[in-house]
Amino acid sequence: MIAWWKNQRGEWYVIVQVFLFALVLFGPRELPGLPRWGTPAATATLIAGALLIVAGGALGATGLLNLGRNLTPLPHPKDDATLVQSGAYAIVRHPIYSGLILGALGWALVVASWLTLAYAVILFMFFDIKSRREERWLAGKFADYAAYQRRVRKLLPWVY
């Protein structure tokens, strides 16, 4: 049995991730001197935010379905895992993370909060760090992972 506190399979990444999700959803939305944006922008950001949430949800859900039996909450791949390169994984290497990032950005726009937008950016940076570790494990497990990395963007479809 592997001790979770040793982070051998990325257990601490999952704990930090849960904290960041809670921060995005339930964290403070205002700081003194940092007001929410005004009414004209709030209408536009509400629509843009809702679209980002829907797009992120669709991308993340598709990634979950495409991953199938390979799905694990930990960034370390299962021992019997196969490399999935089709479906959402043909668009971005980490569609579940991408969907969560898009959803968090969308939520920040919906609640019209600069502070929540900062939390979403922190979540993006966290997933960038987490995915780097995950990709070292994947490259060690799958010989064709390096070619996949060259072909498909990491976190933002067609961008990054």
Image: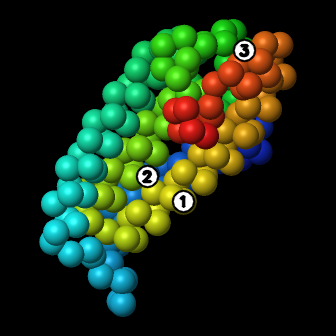
Is residue 67 shown to the viewer in this render? yes
> For mark 1, what is the residue?
122
Q: Give the percent coordinates (x, y) of residue 156.
A: 53, 38
Task: Identify whether 39 is placed above or below 145.
Answer: below
N-terminal of the pair, mark 3 or mark 1, is 3
CA gap, disc 2 and disc 3? 28 Å
Q: Residue 79: give its label.
A: 3
Query: Label 1's element?
Result: helix
Task: Residue at 42% x, 30% y: name it.
Answer: 60
Q: Would you identify the image quadrant in which residue 76 lies?
A: top right
Q: Would you identify the image quadrant in which residue 138 lies?
A: top right
Which three-letter amino acid code belongs to the residue tagged 3?
Answer: Asp
Which three-letter amino acid code belongs to the residue tagged 2?
Answer: Phe
Indicate left or right for 49 with 121 as reference: left
- Of discs 1 and 2, which sits in the foreground? 1
> For mark 2, what is the residue?
21
Q: Give the percent coordinates (x, y) of residue 37.
A: 26, 74
Which three-letter amino acid code belongs to the residue tagged 1?
Answer: Ile
Is residue 73 shown to the viewer in this render? no
